[in-house]
Amino acid sequence: MLVTAGAGWLYLELGGDISAFDADGLSKDRPDASSEGQNVLVIGSDARTGGNRALGGGKKGDIGRSDTAFLLHVYADHRHALAVSVPRDALVDIPACRLPDGSWTAPRHNAMFNSAFSVGETAQGNPACTQNTVEKLTGVRVDHTVVVDFQGFAELTEVVGGVRVCLPQDVYEKDLDPHRTERGERIFAKGEQDVSGRRALDYVRLRHGIGDGSDIGRIKRQQAFVAALLKKVKSDGLTPGKLLPLADAAVRSMTVDPGLDSAGKLLSFVLSLKDIDLRNTKFVTVPWRYEGARVAIVEPDADALWAALREDRTIDGEDAGGKRGKSRKSGAKDTAEDAGAGSPSPSPEPVSGAGIEVAVYNGTTVTGLAAQGAQALEDHGFTVTGTATAGGQDLASTVVRYGPGEEDHARTVARLFPDAELRPGSKPGISVTLGSSYADAASAAASDAPSAAASDVPAKVPSEVADDARSAADSPCSRLSYG
């Protein structure tokens, strides 16, 4: 009775609706819900609208960009949660997105992840486009999207009375703004301390003053900050008196999808998280590697991570479907594909790819085909430099492209793909773009492998991902990389 009364009191106190973005911008071709859990996309925006310019600098009306983003999966048992960060410089495919005039853009290949939020070049940004991009990347249906700007973030940290952080050294104004000519005043002292408001915002935005100055290092600190924030909120208790100031700040400063566009909806969602254990709340970064100045997502490692979310499996392999969901195992199709059972039979003579580097692209609409092709190549000793979706997805036959002087190596690659067409190019490197004929052969091979298809053993998330995970119960100084 007390909880119900408290919730009703909060609803009456808050009243007004939260700012919501237009759902018409969401893709019409979205992944099906494959888990009883919930997926929430959280975006940190650097928009300069309202009071944000005073906190973040820049010019009023600057194009809104996403500084940070993570996908939070709340497992069906409502006792586990996993937040997966996506680096802003990660190279991804951005699907068609809606512009302010109602028209739609053409899909983009190999674009920076944070550019999705800037589609349309508005000051408020484009949350729907980022959600479309995440769904395209992960194959996971996003249930809710929340955008927090500078001002909203600062207010939330003040409401909770500060958040505990850890710094390895003194930090000065020039560390925050490398364009300064002088070091300036000290803004953070070495060691643990509580930060809130502008100081909290400076901490999570700090990049150049610690470690190698990379965005990856900053992601680690941001994960530690969100973990500490969750710990603080949970320790204070999810009571009406504690929730009202938090919810009030959220109403005034967040942009959400229509599914969370009222105080009642937001409150209901927050209260559904009250039983999640801090030790079972984990933070990871999608498997990645550097590709020049950008970040490439590593496959099939990332696919294994997304599959775990779809199946309500933790990164440690535990079934977290719980009583609220179904106990799920990898389906026959997933198991066959992950095991490489769908790969067409290689040519009779042994194929050795030692010393040959290949990039793999999916030229069809069949999910996971590039990962299958990559696995077939790696099984024969080739080095796969990356996988991605091709610019067009209607390719009939597989194409092997090669640069000057690389024809012999390209022919070796083609031996694994009997229908492949060799095409010379002017740029160095070898790539394979898989066509529908390869997908058909993979499907036929999978149907001929009943023992693999019947396996109940799910694909495992790579141990490096689990080993590098941060728990919300960790000390602010532990498991923290400064780049």
Image (cartoon, rainbow, N blue to C red):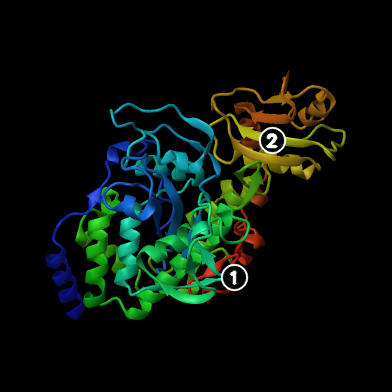
Q: Are marks 2 and 1 in contact (CB under 8 Å)?
A: no
* Kind of residue indicated by mark 1: Arg
Tell me the quarter of the image containing the C terminus. bottom right
Quick one: which residue is furthest to the right in this view? Answer: 349
Q: Is residue 92 above or below residue 175?
A: above
Where does residue 171 sit, x and y in percent of width and height? Answer: 53, 65
* Placement of 224 over or under 191, stated as above or below: above
Query: Of residues 57 and 347, which is closer to you in this image?
Result: 57
Q: Nearer the viewer, residue 243 or 380?
A: 243
Locate residue 176, reporting x and y percent. 49, 57
Depth-wise, is mark 2 or mark 1 nearer the camera? 1
Give the structural element (helix, strand or loop) at label 2.
strand
Q: Which mark is residue 479?
A: 1
Q: Is residue 322 above or below residue 45?
A: below
**Identity, as a three-letter code, of the amino acid under mark 2:** Ala
Instruction: Left or right? Give the position of 459 relative to 349.
Output: left
The residue drawn where x is 77% and y is 28% is 414
Q: The residue tagged with tag 1: helix, strand or loop?
A: loop
Label placed on residue 238:
none
Q: Which residue is disc 2 drawn over?
A: 359
Say which of 154 and 175 sits in front: 175
Q: Residue at x 37, y 69 (%)?
A: 196
- Residue 316 in the image: above or below residue 67: below
Image side of residue 379 versus residue 96, left or right: right
Residue 340, position in %: x, y? 68, 45
Asked whether residue 311 is in view, the answer is no
Note whether residue 400 is visible: yes
